[in-house]
Amino acid sequence: SGGCADAANFSCGSIKNAGDCNGYEECEWKAERFEPHTETCIAKPGGTATEIALANAYTALAVCYQVGVMISRSSLKYVKIKRVDVLTALQLANLVLWLLQDKLRFMNIWVQFVAMVFVGLLGGASYVNVFYLLLNDPKIPDKDRETCVNLAALFINAGIVLS
């Protein structure tokens, strides 16, 4: 029959709520090492590129984010940003953009992919430049650098946990 129904570790059914997967198959991953009954949407065989992108949007957006992070964290040798407050302001604008997207649904999936790379670029650039500044800013006494780095790492992790 095609789709995920042919895979040994998947169980598929029809979508109960019409908008859940936009008409795609609903599949549950049955492997014991993963969360049981985690629902995902799989594009039907022969779907268009946009249908496939929509069905796999969560994974594709996560990859786009990680690509942006990798690029920005790898670029410190070429681009150093001393005004990390500008990056923070851009992240706030990004938050507003994605909140509006959640409510208004104005970006198509391809624009979302590009925007998510930008999210990753901002996040990675903030991370790498903050730590670079903490380690190299002449205003920070050498005896305080380790404490500053540890506090920054602590607050980054606290922010992740609280989000």
Image (spheres, grey):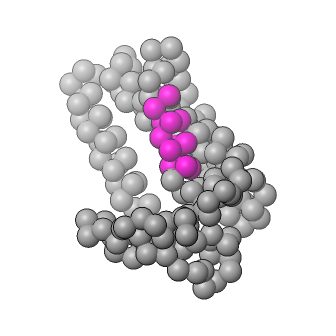
Give x and y (percent) for residue 63.
50, 44
Is 141 placed above or below 91 here?
above
Q: Given the current orientation, which residue lies at the most extreme top position?
A: 78
Classify 9 as above or below 96.
below
Residue 64 x %, y %: 55, 42
Residue extending furthest front? 1
Q: Residue at x 56, y 50 (%)?
A: 61
Return the residue found at the far bottom.
16
Magenta stretch bounds: 60-71
Question: Residue placed at 54% from the left, 64% from the top?
Answer: 3
Along the viewing direction, whichever of 12 and 54 lies nearer the viewer: 12
**Residue 85 in the image: x percent, y percent?**
56, 35
Nearer to me, 113 or 104: 113
Q: Main secondary structure of the magenta part?
A: helix
| Visible residue check, residue 96 | no
Q: Is residue 131 left or right of residue 108?
A: left
Residue 9 among magenta residues:
no
Residue 155 in percent (x, y) is at 35, 48
Residue under the image location 29 percent in, 34 percent down: 149
Q: For this view, does 40 lie left or right of residue 159?
A: right
- Please determine whether, in this image, residue 103 is positioned above or below residue 91: below
Numbered circles on residues, count = 0
* Residue occupying image coordinates x 54% and y 74%: 26
Q: Quarter holding the N terminus?
A: bottom right
* Relative to 14, residue 108 above or below: above
